[in-house]
Image (cartoon, rainbow, N blue to C red):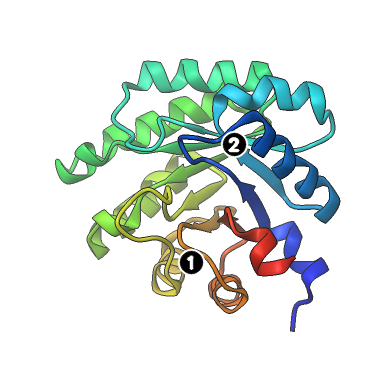
Amino acid sequence: MMDTQTLWPYIDHTLLKPTASWTEVQTLCAEALEKKAASVCIPPSFVARIQKTFGDLNICTVIGFPLGYHTTRIKVEEARAAMEDGAGELDMMINLGEVKAGNFEALTGEIAALREISAGRVLKVIVETCYLTEAEKIKLCGCVSRAGADYIKTSTGFGSAGATVADVKLFARHIGPGVKIKASGGVSTREELLALIEAGASRIGTSRGMTILG
């Protein structure tokens, strides 16, 4: 059984609600440092201030979030700005319209464009599983793997549903060597967290880390 101290390094301690305040973000970051979370996942507008205030903290931010239908050019520039501000990890949202149109080569190309400019940083690709068929999920595992991203991520937390054990297991069967899994969205109990890790998740994105683990 994994104890609390062992579990915190799996957590991307997250605050992405639209009304997130500077005070709340600072509290989140202080908690992440104290608990030794994997990262804080925060809105891009806070990255530069957090980097100056919490210098050694691993900062994750979101790109093309939460809907993903920004152009590739905008996502690339957003990623570039986030890295200049101090982000060490980028969670990019894919274009779901391209998924539904079957344009998987275009999706691979967009991920690859983000991978090219983010060399040396961690790139996670959010696919928003609640809107996907099983066949689409498998296809996206291929896109993420071929493009060289570090993680495939289940959800934004803003869709109709979040991470499931079934999806994590599906990803684990179909991602390429070296690609990891981030489970996020709706993770609210220790039991869920443990089940997702057991299924194959290397990161857990949650805004409830303090409630789950204390």
Amino acid found under the numbered disc labelled 2: Ile
Residue, x 33% and y 34% (percent of image)? 68
Relative to 145, residue 50 above or below? above
From what the image shows, is residue 37 above or below residue 96? below
Q: Which mark is residue 42?
A: 2
- Helix, strand or loop for disc 1: helix
Which residue is more in the foreground, 153 or 212? 212
Q: Is residue 72 left or right of residue 50?
A: left
Image quarter of the C terminus: bottom right
Q: Quadrant of the N terminus?
A: bottom right
| Residue in the image at 43% along x and 55% along y | 154
Residue 77 on image: x %, y %: 48, 15
* Residue in the image at 79% along x and 43% along y: 30
Residue 174 sits in which quadrant? bottom left
Q: Residue furthest left?
A: 101
Q: What's the amino acid at mark 1? A: Ala
Badge 1 vs badge 2, beta-carbon distance below 8 Å: no
Closest to the observer, 180 or 39: 39
Q: Report how many numbered discs are placed on residues in the image.
A: 2
Counting residues from the N terminus, which is met first, the one under dot 1 or under dot 2? 2
Q: Mark 2 falls on what kind of element?
A: strand
Which residue is label 1 attached to? 172
Depth check, mark 1 against mark 2: the one in front is 2
